[in-house]
């Protein structure tokens, strides 16, 4: 259309139990390499009970892309804003899963 690349973004998470009803989890971006290479930062907004509840990850890392680790007792919907190297923004949501 206007020469800009359009790509699909999604997020995922892993989780493992660490105590009764408590989980340790890792959020990450799950997208094709050509999409991941265009991302400069990812902002994760967690449940309001987290203090702080907004985290910006600008390091892609060497494992899963743009990881954020945390722990807690319940699942919730994570709001994600993706910032690209060409100053575009995308928003998506991910329902945290403990499986």
Image (cartoon, rainbow, N blue to C red):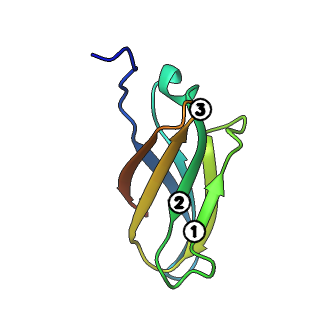
Dot 1 falls on a residue whose secondary structure is strand
Q: CA distance from mark 2 to mark 3?
A: 18 Å
Dot 3 falls on a residue whose secondary structure is loop
- Circle 1 Cα neighbour tier, 10 Å, few/some/many (<14 / 14–19 / ≥20): some
- Circle 2 Cα neighbour tier, 10 Å, few/some/many (<14 / 14–19 / ≥20): many
Q: CA distance from mark 1 to mark 3?
A: 20 Å
Say which quarter of the image contains residue 71. Answer: bottom right
Q: Can residue 21 be spotted in the picture? A: yes
Check contact, mark 2 vs mark 1: CB within 8 A. Answer: yes
Q: CA distance from mark 2 to mark 1?
A: 6 Å
Mark nearer the N terminus (2 vs 3): 2
Residue that mark 2 sits on:
44
Q: Can residue 97 be spotted in the picture? A: no
Check contact, mark 2 vs mark 3: CB within 8 A. Answer: no
Rendered location of residue 23, percent (x, y): 55, 71
Q: In front of the other: label 2 or label 3?
A: 3
Say which quarter of the image contains residue 16. Answer: bottom right
Residue that mark 3 sits on:
85
Rendered location of residue 74, percent (x, y): 43, 78
The total number of labels drawn is 3
- The residue sitting at 36% across, 56% down in the picture is 93
Residue that mark 1 sits on:
54
Rendered location of residue 18, percent (x, y): 62, 72
In this view of the protein, which residue sits in the foreground, 26 or 50?
50
């Amino acid at each position: 259309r206007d020469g800009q690349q359009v790509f699909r973004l999604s997020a995922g998470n892993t989780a493992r139990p660490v105590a009764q009803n408590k989980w340790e989890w890792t959020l990450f971006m799950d997208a094709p390499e050509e999409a991941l290479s265009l991302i400069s930062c990812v902002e994760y907004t967690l449940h309001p009970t987290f203090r702080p509840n907004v985290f910006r990850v600008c390091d892609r890392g060497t494992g899963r892309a743009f990881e954020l680790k945390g722990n807690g007792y319940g699942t919730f919907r994570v709001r994600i804003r993706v910032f690209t190297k060409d100053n575009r923004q995308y928003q998506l949501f991910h329902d945290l899963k403990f499986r």
